[in-house]
Image (tube, rainbow, N blue to C red):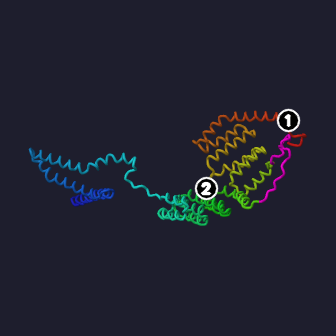
Amino acid sequence: MGHALTIALNVCLSLFALGFIGWIFWRALKQSDEPGMLVCKWLLTMAIFFAEWKYALPMYGGGGFGSIIAIGITGGLAMAFNVIWRHSIIEIFTKPLSNVFDGGSEPPEPKPAYSMAQAKRKSSRPLEAIVLIREQLAKFPTDFEGVLLLANIQAEDLNDLPGAEITLNHFCDAKNVPDRQVVGALTQLADWHLKKSADVDGARAALQKIVVRFPDTEMALRAEQRLAHLGETEKIILAQHDRQVLAVPVGVNNIGLLDSTDFLRPKEIEPGKLAAVYVKHLEQHPHDAEVREKLAVIYARDFKRLDLATLELNELLNEPRHSAKQMAAWLNQLANFQVELGADAAAVAATLEQIVERFPDSPMAEIAQRRLARVNYEIKGQQATAEVKLGVYEQRLGLKYGKPGQHQ
């Protein structure tokens, strides 16, 4: 039983060795630039080993003059072997180094080429360019560069926005398309709806697809913020397409002789009215970071209400989809408000420490650390500035505001 097992094991090992050698030969033959020449080398090598085994090895055992002849035969066969395989041997040692510069023998990754299509487009032959692009997309159907180039030609050169929309929607519906590319395609589609056909509803539908497809992401947040401003965009577009005659008021006579022209300056919107507009806007679009930040500034600078400004900035800070850079900027803004409106050093330091805790090992954290070291100096500087301004204000109260009691 043991002898039979040994024979079976030897047979298996022999078959494995023959299979491995055969696989090496097949792989080398497949990668060779001259497979016919490689086969000839193998045959000559087999002949050399056969001659060594048939003629040289038996002479070594005889001793004397026969051993000298055997050494000569072996040397001649070794020289023949060297002539046959010298280039391959050299390549084994030099190829790792050459691969660093020429990329090795691996075939280059296939990529689409659009240079001819772009040349056709520049030559005002967009239809021919589309044919060439579609040939490449037949091989690489999810190549974003090609899809966007095709849609660009359709929308910009052929004024075929519906065709461009079909192209981009088909790309977005394909499998395994990166999220960033889908967002880029839908954003581009929204831009074309506004630019080419003044279609605000079409742009809104494209942006809404981003919100629905990628909920609770930074990409959806950006789309929501842009949706919040589409109303303003619509007013601008309508004003451009429906221009009305504007009545130009009569200018002031002898303007150069006037003592003051301050009354000619356009009146600024009252902060209270502007804040009311922002509050109403945020009720409809709560994710509009730009308007919420402006509202916080009005609360802090115009109404001196640090509590209301803090609430608005905290609304922004509690939205995790904002970038780290934006959040650090809002925390620094909150610290500025606290310094300006008389908060103590502990409150300012607690705000700045949030930057360090939220974004450790970041440039924002390093800046916050440096600012933490000089919080007391900032507060003292603000207090000194306020005292100087208050003195000037009290001295010129009667000259600046007229009758006492009219303004607070």
Of residues 157 and 393, which is closer to you in this image?
157
Badge 1 or badge 2: first in the primary sequence: 2
Say what secondary structure mark 1 lies in: loop
Q: Which mark is residue 220?
A: none
Q: Is residue 17 visible?
A: no
Of labels 1 and 2, the one closer to you:
1
Q: Position of residue 262 (x, y in %)?
A: 83, 43
Drawn side of residue 153 relative to residue 102, left or right: right
Per the rendered image, the range of residues in magenta is: 244-266
Quadrant placement of the C terminus: top right
Q: Position of residue 249 (x, y in %)?
A: 83, 52
Residue where numbered disc 1 is placed: 396
Q: Is residue 115 visible?
A: yes
Q: Position of residue 191 (x, y in %)?
A: 63, 59
Drawn side of residue 403 relative to residue 146, left or right: right
Within 10 angstroms of label 1, few (less than 14), some, or many (20 or more) residues? few
Quadrant placement of the N terminus: bottom left
Give the alpha-carbon distance from disc 1 to disc 2, as whole Å.
Answer: 53 Å
Residue where numbered disc 2 is placed: 219
